[in-house]
Amino acid sequence: MGNKVKYGLKNVHYAVITVNSDTGAVSYGTPTRIPGAVTLSAPPKGEKTEFFADDAAYFVATANQGYEGTLEVALVPDIFKKDVLGYKEDVNGVLFEASDATAKDIALLFEFNGDQNGTRHIFYNVAVGRPGMESSTKGQNIEVKTETMNITASPSLDNGYVKAKADAGTSAYDAWFDLVYVYEEAGV
């Protein structure tokens, strides 16, 4: 029986995308965990086109340009800043953000809970924005501040797939965070 509801967010991972400049083939690095997932919001991106004829909507189509939203985490890990956002670490362990740093695109993997079982998801081609900085003085209570990154999940450069999901009980689900799962043709 499938889920009736979904809730929660956990097991957020990223895998850096590499595109072969000669062939255009896309490959993914090994997924790396981003601990402290708080929220993921990704409304669909794409315009709806309506053509009217015979006094009605004669043709309606929506362009699927992926999703655009935010990923909020407790604290963006330094390894993510280096791997994805282009930060550099010097010999003394000091992390530098350069004005000319170029971010790398990633695959973003994550999991939702459900009333029956979990569902694992992947966005195949994600551009990530830099997180903002915020903190405040400690008063009588400690108020935790999180970090939020803007994300844009676009169609994959090689096959056009935007996302995929796997439900619990499948071999793909079990190995979801080991490698980036890619589409497999039946009988191939």
Image (cartoon, helix red, strand yellow):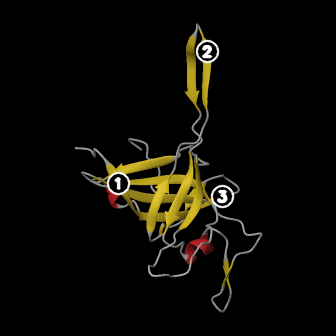
79 left or right of 34? right
- Residue 20 is labelled as 3
Q: Quadrant of the C terminus?
A: top left
Which residue lies at the image location 28% right of the left edge and 44% below the top edge?
4
* Depicted 56 relative to depicted 85: above or below: above
22 left or right of 111? right
Q: Which residue is mark 2?
A: 52
Could you tell me residue 45's position as x and y percent?
A: 58, 42
The kind of residue on which mark 1 rests is Tyr
Q: CA distance from mark 2 to mark 3?
A: 44 Å
Residue 179 appears anywhere in the view: no
Q: CA distance from mark 1 to mark 3?
A: 38 Å
The kind of residue on which mark 3 rests is Asn
- Residue 7 is labelled as 1
The kind of residue on which mark 2 rests is Phe
**Marks 1 and 3 close (CB-CB < 8 Å):** no
Which residue lies at the image location 56% right of the left edge and 14% below the top edge?
58
Q: Mark 2: which secondary structure?
A: strand
